[in-house]
Image (spheres, grey):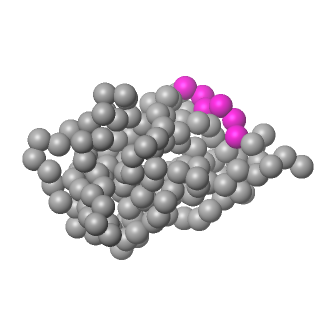
Amino acid sequence: MAEMNQYVSFILSDERYAIDIMSVEEIIKLIEVTPVPKAPDFVEGIINMRGKVIPVVDLKNRLNLGESEETPETRIMITAIKDKTVGFIVDAVEEVLRIEPDLVEKAPGVATSIDSNYIRGVARTDKGLIIILNVNKLFSSYEEDQLMGF
């Protein structure tokens, strides 16, 4: 039997997405995000978590899926992207999934409205299709340099 990969699944605009669990440091309820003057467009602001300043990105906005609306289920997923900690605002976090690698297929280029460079693959589960994102490709190297300024 193939080794299972684990992913954290979440909701954006009524669609299911997931990222590798090894990228997720923590999941917290939405707290107040402090806007930062002259921050890059993709940065909503910053939060202070236990003395550490973390830039926060609205993942829905980043993927051109519209603006997030705050609900009781809205969460911030604290993730590690290369050497930087970044918070992603998501509509809701669902569960941890164990998926066999051979169940993850390459995403068809027109299957989704988001940039296919961000997608690691699509997994078929008993709850339907899940788009697996590659968090290391969500930002260009220039944008990563901007994130390092926080």
Q: Residue at x 80, y 49 (%)?
A: 3
Q: Residue at x 21, y 39 (%)?
A: 40
- Residue 102, by quadrant, is top right
Residue 129 in the image: state x and y as whole percent: 63, 47
Q: Residue at x 49, y 60 (%)?
A: 25
Please indicate whether residue 98 sits to the left or right of residue 40 in the image.
right
In reply to whether residue 102 is colored magenta, the answer given is no
> What main secondary structure does the magenta stretch of the protein show?
loop
Q: Residue at x 38, y 34 (%)?
A: 139
Residue 68 in the image: state x and y as whole percent: 31, 55
Please indicate whether residue 135 sits to the left or right of residue 70 in the image.
right
Q: Nearer the viewer, residue 65 or 34?
A: 34
Residue 71 in the image: state x and y as whole percent: 33, 69
Q: Does any portion of residue 21 appear in the rendered image?
A: yes
Please indicate whether residue 84 sits to the left or right of residue 125 in the image.
left
Please indicate whether residue 78 sits to the left or right of residue 69 in the image.
right
Q: Nearer the viewer, residue 119 or 64?
A: 119
20 relative to 137, above or below: below
103 relative to 108, above or below: below
Query: For the image shown, how many numbered marks are present on the structure?
Result: 0
In reply to whether residue 107 is colored magenta, the answer given is yes
Q: Does any portion of residue 42 appear in the rendered image?
A: no
Q: Which span is picked out in magenta?
A: 104-109
Looking at this view, name the residue that lies furthest to the left: 37
Residue 148 in the image: state x and y as whole percent: 30, 41
Looking at this view, name the residue that lies furthest to the right: 1
